[in-house]
Amino acid sequence: MNDCIFCKIANGIIPSQKMYEDEKMIIIKDINPQAKLHYLAIPKEHFCDITELSKNSPETLTHMFSVIADKKDELGFKDGMRVITNVGENGCQSVKHIHIHLLGGEKLSEKMG
Ligand code: AMP
Ligand code: ZN
């Protein structure tokens, strides 16, 4: 997608603070952190949201969660984390390229929505 910011980040056109990269995905620091630690796991291939990703490339979704599980201690989530992906208007998804928020590094609020 030409004008998609996360496609540009995934392709290195826009710089980011990359914590992890492989052929299918990246994990970057969120530019506007909502917790002590706030990362985004982003597939390199463009899908609008998690419903499109799971329908069209379930193996990528599985891969992403497998990497998150492998890397969680290294990323600072030994004591837990919150894993969120916003979908659409009511979910307040602002970037229309699926990304999984990883939040933690501290005790988070019990409030979810
Ligand atoms: P969402 O509202 O779920 O679509 O989340 C979009 C997230 O992307 C927000 O947490 C933003 O802070 C983050 N974000 C937007 N632009 C960038 C960027 N260039 N680098 C890192 N994170 C970004
Ligand atoms: Zn994209």
Image: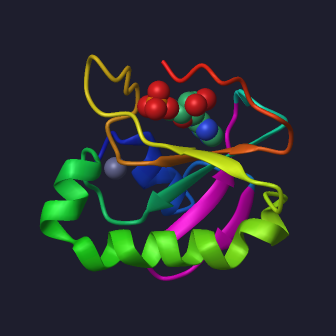
The location of residue 68, given as percent across then percent down, is 60, 68
Seen at 67% across and 39% down, the residue is 30
Q: Is residue 70 left or right of residue 25?
A: right
Q: How many marks?
A: 0
x and y percentages locating residue 19 in the rendered image = 74, 64
Q: Locate residue 34: give its quadrant.
A: top right
Q: Residue 27: percent from the left, percent from the top?
A: 62, 61
Render colour scheme: rainbow
Q: Which contiguous range is marked in magenta?
A: 18-31
Instruction: Specify whether 90 is left or right of 44.
Output: left
**In which quadrant of the rendered view does residue 87 lie?**
top left
Name above or below for residue 23 compared with residue 30: below
Q: Quadrant of residue 22?
A: bottom right
**Residue nearest the viewer, comparing 78 with 102:** 78
Residue that protrudes farthest toward the left in the picture: 55
The magenta stretch spans residue 17: no
Q: Nearer the viewer, residue 37 or 1?
A: 37
Residue at image location 25% in from the left, 27% down from the top: 88
Report the residue at 51% width, 78% height from top: 66
Query: In the image, is residue 44 above or below residue 67?
Result: above
**Is 11 drawn above or below residue 5 in the view shown?**
below
* Residue 104, image x, y percentages: 76, 43
**Which SS type dominates the magenta stretch?**
strand
Q: Residue at x 56, y 65 (%)?
A: 26
Farthest residue in the front direction?
A: 110
- Foreground: 16 or 72? 72
Q: Is residue 3 left or right of residue 53?
A: right
Q: Is residue 1 visible?
A: no
